[in-house]
Image (cartoon, rainbow, N blue to C red):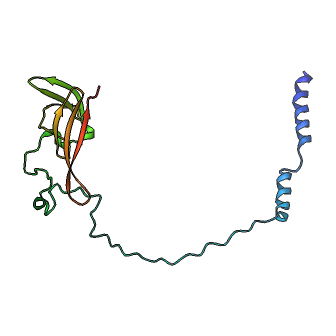
Amino acid sequence: MMRKYLIPLFACTLLSACGGEKHSDLREFVKNSDNLPRGRIPPLPEVLPYVPVEYTAFDLTDPFKPRKIEPPKGAAVAGGVQPDVNRRREPLEAYPLEALKMVGILKQKGYFALVKTPDNNLFQVKSGNYLGQNFGRITEISDGSIKLREIVQDSNGNWEEKDQTLLLQE
């Protein structure tokens, strides 16, 4: 029975012998910290005066506004290539060419291609139909591709023809 009381009494005696002044190592560090070498804080850099700059690019084309689809003035006189802006638009001209996928071919008195839109609608097209937002007209349909010619506007506002190919997607 005495043994029950001896073990906790012995443990308390042992723990009280280990104790001393609380946080003595921390107090010693604080005393000695005044003797440590101190770092030097560099001075703040000199602040230069603000010089306003006048914005002079009001006359330039805004890159964030969509381009006009009308041909530039004088293009008809020069006899250059230009799109027919008065014709009726076809449904596949509402999508960018990169978003359209050729998914199949039909042979019925000539070649017809099946084109899938981003919203999963399927269209049947033939040579002469229009695709994409750059006035792209289909020139040829083969077993694995649709070739078309787009009319795009360059940075000077002139219209030029560009050949594109839409490959069959599996």
Above or below, 130 against 72 in this view is above
Residue at image coords 26%, 38%: 99
> In this rendering, would 114 be left or right of 109?
right
Give the quarter of the figure containing the C terminus: top left
Give how far across and how far down residue 10 sits, in percent. Answer: 91, 32
Work out whether residue 146 or residue 8 is closer to the camera in this orientation and state it: 146
Above or below, 139 against 74 in this view is above
Above or below, 106 against 99 in this view is above
Give how far across and how far down residue 164 sits, in percent. Answer: 24, 40
Q: Is residue 118 visible?
A: no
Work out whether residue 3 or residue 49 is closer to the camera in this orientation and state it: 49
The image quarter containing residue 119 is top left
> In this rendering, would 34 be left or right of 57?
right
Above or below, 104 against 74 in this view is above
Give how far across and how far down residue 144 sits, in percent. Answer: 24, 27
Work out whether residue 100 or residue 43 is closer to the camera in this orientation and state it: 100
Give how far across and how far down residue 89 sits, in percent. Answer: 11, 44
* Outermost residue toward the front in this view: 79
Q: Is residue 60 visible?
A: yes
The image quarter containing residue 2 is top right
Residue at image coords 10%, 61%: 77
- The total number of labels drawn is 0
Residue at image coords 14%, 53%: 82
> In this rendering, would 73 be left or right of 145?
left
Give the quarter of the figure containing the N terminus: top right
